Amino acid sequence: MGLYDETTLFVKTNLGTSFALSISPDITAHDLKGKLGREHCYRFPYIGQIKVHGLMVKKKSFFYHFSDSMLMKYAFEELSGTWLLYLEASLLKIQG
């Protein structure tokens, strides 16, 4: 990957939503959680804000959680094609 390359990430959530976005492969799982939470709210405003609890990848029918410090490029370094990520989240309740 070049210096300015981004890759497309396909995301499936436990909330029944799916979306795609471009990310830098050098983003950490922690920063990606924040980005995905904001992007989800933007794409699905009728659902409201969410809290992202975990990011996972499926390999050979097992799900693996990412540590917050992990760079996403290392999670997908064996893949040359589509990056598919499973997002575990819950809805945030707005108190008012």
Image (cartoon, rainbow, N blue to C red):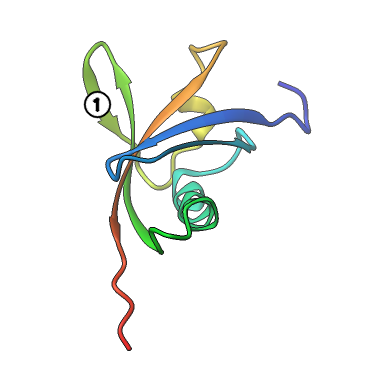
Q: Is residue 44 left or right of residue 56?
A: right
Which of the image's four quarters has the N terminus? Answer: top right
The quadrant holding residue 11 is top left
Q: Is residue 55 above or below residue 45?
A: above
Q: Is residue 71 left or right of residue 5?
A: left
- Disc 1 packing (10 Å; few <14; some 14–19; many ≥20): few
Which of the image's four quarters has the C terminus? Answer: bottom left
Amino acid type at image mark 1: Phe
Q: Is residue 17 left or right of residue 22?
A: left
The quadrant holding residue 27 is top right
The residue identified by callout 1 is 63
Residue 71, image x and y in percent? 51, 37
* Direction bottom: furthest residue: 96
Residue found at x 27% / y 41%: 14
* Direction left: furthest residue: 62
Mark 1 falls on what kind of element?
A: strand
Q: Considering depth in this image, is 57 or 19 the residue closer to the camera? A: 19
Q: Is residue 53 above or below residue 80?
A: below
Q: Considering depth in this image, is 4 or 90 the residue closer to the camera? A: 90
Count of residue discs: 1
Residue 89, image x and y in percent? 30, 51
Q: Considering depth in this image, is 59 or 92 the residue closer to the camera? A: 92
Residue 23, image x and y in percent? 62, 38
Residue 87, image x and y in percent? 35, 41
Residue found at x 64% / y 37%: 24
Residue found at x 43% / y 60%: 46
* Direction front: furthest residue: 46
